[in-house]
Image: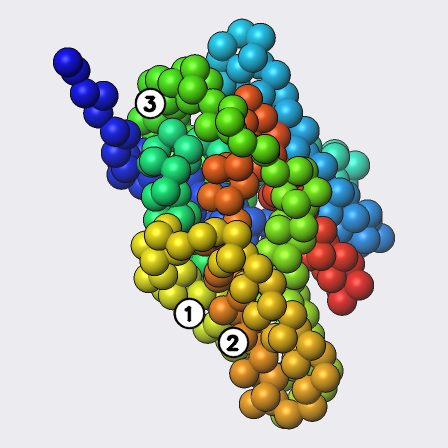
Amino acid sequence: MSIEKAPSLKWREVYSLAALNAAVVISWIAYHEYQPILMKNLGITHLIDFLIIAKAIILIVIPPLAGWLADRILKKNGKYMIIFTVGIGATAMIFMVVATLIGTSHIMDVSGIIPFMIVVWLISMNLFISPANSMIEAFAPAKQLPIVVGVLFLVTELLYALEPVVVALVTFFGDTLTFVVGGILISVTGFIFHRVSRDEVMQRKTELMANDRVKNQTPISYLAIIVVGLFLGIGKAFLVEFLPEHFATRFPGFTAYEGYISFAILGMCAISGFLISKKVSKSDLKKVIISSFLVLAVGVVAMIFSYNPYLTILAALIIGAGFTMVNISGLPFVIRNLSVRHVTYGVGIYIGASEVITGLFEYMLR
């Protein structure tokens, strides 16, 4: 009698996804650094509010839409990587087109096309996010998904914590070369991830569809996914958007440090998330998520009502703890409790919901 071998953790695929996520983070940092400069140089600063609103809407709407399309294509044609491939290809191409337009801006008027290209770039960047991140279910047994997320979280949040270094690099490269490098990073890491994971994803998808994990249980509702995503977004928004502005407004003497405090906390979140991921994988994810909600609530209330800079930092650390817990447990919870036929859509809803509060804060605190 043959014994079926249990799926193992596929580290090569996990590392290739981590590399792709790193390229995405670097691209976002470059975008935030150069978008205001481009708008100013081209004399179209009146469109900044439009782009902030467009970005918020795209980050909320496109991931679930891309996830729904990916699930539909898988169901009808048995192909999973189409949306991912289109998103990667379009993003890399738009990077190169924008680099060319910037390079020729001194001999021709590109002020009309650049905002349009930015919107198209924002859409393409979000086309492959939910398909790529939902693929982690093919890289590890369900119980070990928090470990995979811990690795991804370590890479992405450390890069955000090192944003001043990344900004210094993109400033050194200049606008044209930065967009060229961004296109190369996305295309190369996307190609490697596709090459490394394509066969594994399709094999595991086929196995999972034949033995759907939620066949004998009630799947979670999309409302629950939205709630978990919103709480993840609250943690991110308060650490990245609210904390620096709060310090600048309430504690003028600490103005020079507000950004560094936020970056330092993100770095601690990255390392602690990686360290607790194995323990989370052995815990009840629902209990971890509920605990993270309570921790986030305490930290948010403490930060809003704090008039002492040191108590505000303590509140930020509490928010960071809750943010880390929900980050490590949230995506595995969504994937483990959805049918494989709808998992990419569910992941897209989770990602989109996580951007709601950040988009709102970015507009209100600009």
Classify 315 as above or below 146: below
Outermost residue, left side? 1
Which quarter of the rendered picture does the N terminus lie within?
A: top left
Q: Is residue 177 above or below residue 74?
A: below
Q: Earlier in the sequence, mark 3 or mark 2?
A: 3
Amino acid type, residue under disc 1 in the picture? Met
| Residue 232 visible in the current orientation | yes
Name the residue rendered at 59%, 33% in the picture: 218
> Is tag 3's residue or tag 1's residue first in the polypeptide sequence?
3
Q: Which mark is on residue 103?
A: none
Q: Looking at the picture, how far across and down is residue 69, in whole percent? A: 63, 21
Q: Nearer the viewer, residue 228 or 71?
A: 228
Element under disc 2: helix
**Mark pair 3, 2: CA separation:** 39 Å
Locate residue 311: give its quadrant.
Answer: bottom right
Where is residue 125? Give x, y as percent. 58, 36
How far apart are labels 2 and 1 at the CA level? Answer: 9 Å
Residue 31 located left or right of residue 50: left
Measured from the top left, where is residue 106 in percent x and y? 67, 43
Q: Residue at x 55, y 63 (%)?
A: 292
Q: Which residue is mark 1?
A: 268
Q: Kindly check if marks 2 and 1 are in contact, taking CB atoms under 8 A apart as contact.
A: yes
Instruction: Give residue 166's position: percent from left, percent from top.
Output: 45, 59
User: Dots 3 and 1: beta carbons under 8 Å?
Assistant: no
Res. 155 in view: no
Q: Residue at x 63, y 43 (%)?
A: 225
Which numbered dot is residue 200? Answer: 3
